[in-house]
Image (spheres, helix red, strand yellow):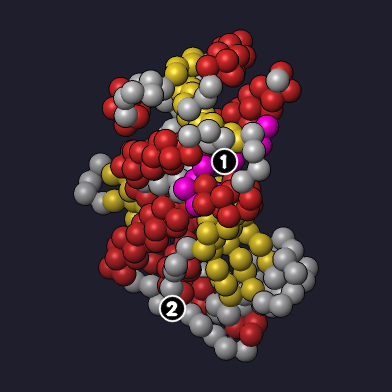
Amino acid sequence: MSDALRVIAYQAEMVLLELAELFQTGPVLRIVHRFWIPGTECLAGEEIWGIVLLVHGGREIPLPLSLALRQLVNYLAETRHIPQSAAQIAAGMCRSAFYAKHGMNSGIASGRRVTRSAVKEYVKRLRRALSLASREAGINLDPLRVLVSRQTVTNEVQYQLRATIQWVHISDSSSPLSS
Amino acid sequence: MATILLANFDEEFRDRLGAFLRIERHIVFVAPESESLPPLLRQSAVDLLIVDVSRREKYACDLLADVGAHRALNGPRPAVLCISRVYRGPRFALDLERKGVRLIYV
């Protein structure tokens, strides 16, 4: 019986650790880039193929996101250490070659032009997608704690993604995953 | 140090597990079988619920449904760990996984 107790105590510690990690660093999101050229990383021309929420046991819950939302998540993930306003996000995405040449390695560009007002709407939709995925995973995360809105001294609101991010690169959809 | 709630265990195993977890410096409560779980979860900040799903299956399912409803309103706490001493097959494990519950066999 003592072996059984030890196994339960060990698993209990593991679950508690995961819970603490979830509260401290947020959930784990995996962003998959397709049309990757070996030897490069997150280079312009790759496509943001999908974004999944990782939960225990290696379970992957895909976030139901359109192209513009996938691009927004990727941008917020890249710049997650600095909260940014909608205007800053729109400017950053317009300026970046990664978003301008999105998917170009496939021969077909699939970019989206993101404006300041669109960012605000996308934030709402992204929170909804996070809520749906976390409910499916059974962890019921508060999306407001994952995509955080930060007040400034004026009425401007800044957004920051509070999550652990993994980028995975694949050369096309049939090849094995490699990071 | 975490607050752990034990539910649906037989008395002997529950006492031994409770003592073992207390040695690990956790605060351990036992869920009274006569009361429903949500008020207890609201009153005390429970971090982890450990449920024995080997016995009284209907009661265990009701408990998990109560916790699921509580978590839908209040976020991911408490985490839930289910323990079974009999093999229940992959479908059972998958059903629990969909509820965000961890299952271990001992």
Name the residue type under label 1.
Answer: Arg
Residue A153 shows up from this direction: yes
Residue occupied by mark 1: B102
Disc number at residue A112? 2
Badge 1 marks a residue whose secondary structure is strand
Name the residue type under label 2.
Answer: Arg
Q: Residue A144: x percent and y percent?
A: 34, 48
Badge 2 marks a residue whose secondary structure is loop
Q: Chain ID for label 1? A: B
Depth check: give the residue in front, A91 or A53: A53
Mark 2–mark 1 distance (CA, rounded to whole Å): 40 Å
Depth check: give the residue in front, B51 or A176: B51
Q: Residue A9: x percent and y percent?
A: 63, 24
Q: Quadrant of residue B16?
A: top right
State the residue at coordinates (55%, 77%). Answer: A102
For discs 2 and 1, the disc positioned in front in the rendered view: 1
Residue A161 shows up from this direction: no
* Quarter occupied by the N terminus of chain A: top right
Horizontally, residue A17 falls left or right of residue A121, namely right
* Quarter occupied by the C terminus of chain A: bottom right
Tell whether label 1 touches label 2 (CB within 8 Å): no
Instruction: Please provide the residue range marked out in magenta.
Output: B97-106
How many numbered marks have been drawn onto this rendered protein structure?
Answer: 2
Above or below: residue B18 compared with residue A46: above
State the residue at coordinates (61%, 46%). Answer: B88
Above or below: residue A166 compared with residue A44: above
